[in-house]
Image (cartoon, helix red, strand yellow):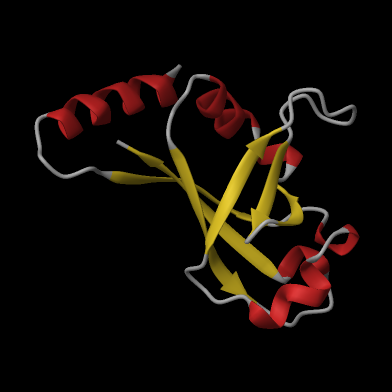
Amino acid sequence: MRFLLTISLLCWLATAQAESIRVLVQNSPLAGSQYYALGELWHEMKIGDGLDLFREPDNKHDRNAIRVEWRGHKLGYVPRAQNRAVAAAMDAGDRLTARVSSLSDNKNPWQRVAFEVFVEL
């Protein structure tokens, strides 16, 4: 509820200004990347690259699942422990964007890519 009130206030402020406002919603590690295309694409990615988010409400493992893609390639998911607010915002029709916030050659897949999710107002 608090998230929605904050977003509502920021939407009101955005309409009062000519420019759009981008608000950071969360910064997360990429989940499940070891099962998808990250290994072959990692060296091509750059910090700041845009990412696409896709809701998967029929995902059999998580009804709040959000798939993360880079240039049409599935990289992984928003972590289950952090996807509820983003899923609710997407379901409500909020305009969200995402970008790569850090890259590491760490062998631990949870530490290779982090990304930020923004709501565009």
In the drawing, does residue 115 fall left or right of residue 42? left
Q: Position of residue 60 (x, y in %)?
A: 90, 27
Q: Is residue 78 visible?
A: no
Q: Quarter of the image containing the N terminus?
A: top left
Residue 35's spot in the image, x, y percent? 90, 58
Residue shown at 34% from the left, 27% from the top = 7
Q: Residue at x 67, y 50 (%)?
A: 68
Q: Position of residue 120 (x, y in %)?
A: 35, 40
Task: Judge whether 8 appears above or below 83 on screen.
Answer: above
Is residue 23 at least partly visible in the picture?
A: yes
Q: Quadrant of residue 94?
A: top left
Residue shown at 87% from the left, 63% from the top: 34
Determine whether 43 is above or below 94 in the image.
below
Between 57 and 84, the one nearer to me in the picture? 57
Residue at x 88% of width, y 31% of height: 61
Q: Nearer the viewer, residue 67 or 64?
A: 67
Asked whether, in this view, residue 114 is left or right of residue 42, the answer is left
- Name the residue furthest front: 72
Above or below: residue 120 compared with residue 72: above
Percent position of residue 6, x then y: 33, 27
Q: Nearer the viewer, residue 19 or 85?
A: 19
Q: Is residue 119 above or below residue 1?
A: below
The C terminus, quarter of image: top left
Q: How many marks?
A: 0
